[in-house]
Image (spheres, rainbow, N blue to C red):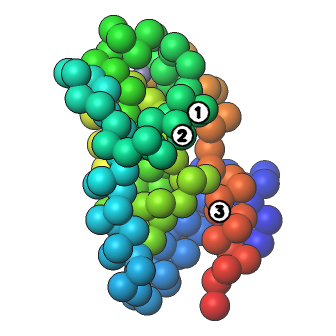
Amino acid sequence: MDVDGKDLKDLFKFADYIGKKRYNRLTIRDFEDYRKFEDWRYINGKYECGTTQESRDWVRDHSDSHCPICNEYYSRRDGKTVDHKLPRSQYPWLSMEFKNLWVICSWCNKEKGEMHWYEYEHYMFLHHSDLYLTVKAARPTELLRSLRRKLP
Ligand SMILES: [Zn+2]
């Protein structure tokens, strides 16, 4: 299946299909990655810091001064957070998959919460239509494509 040119509903179904299929085959390594992210995550809001040098370096290399969603200075939005495009609760094996990570501000991360990426796109379309195209451009298409290739 090609993920290009699919409408949102089809993509959501596709991601859901992959998610459920893989969720039933979780491995010990997946749980370790899930836990590893807790140690690795970077939060600099409220004066917290990244817990590892690796995470600090990664965040530095993958962010600038503005949140890619709201385009505000991170310093005005309680700092940087690392978010999973496909949420960790539904895709625990993608906890440490870097194609699934991006740096967004604390406010946007809270608002996104545990929404699936496609729910989130829909949500943004309805509630922040001015930011919708920005979010759509960050869609994890390449990640979905690679998941498709790895399907058993
Ligand atoms: Zn933001």
Quarter of the view holding residue 123: top left
Quadrant in which the N terminus appears: bottom right
Q: Nearer the viewer, mark 3 or mark 2?
A: 2
Horizontal arrangement in the rendering, residue 137 relative to residue 15 (left or right): right
**Could you give the CA–CA distance between mark 1 and mark 2, rounded to whole angstroms?**
6 Å
**Vertically, is 74 above or below 92?**
above
**Could you give the CA–CA distance between mark 1 and mark 3, rounded to whole angstroms?**
20 Å
Q: Are marks 1 and 2 in contact (CB under 8 Å)?
A: yes
**Vertically, is 74 above or below 146?**
above
**Tag of residue 127:** none
Identify residue for label 2.
Answer: 58
Label 2 sits on what residue type?
Trp
Q: Determine the secondary structure under disc 1.
A: loop
Regarding residue 53, the answer to whether it shows in the image is: yes
Q: Determine the secondary structure under disc 2.
A: helix
Is the residue indicated by label 2 positioned so its CB lies within 8 Å of ligand 1? no
**Vertically, is 15 above or below 5?**
below
Q: Badge 1: how crowded within 10 Å, few (<14), some, or many (20+)?
A: few
Horizontal arrangement in the rendering, residue 138 relative to residue 52 (left or right): right
Identify residue for label 1.
Answer: 62
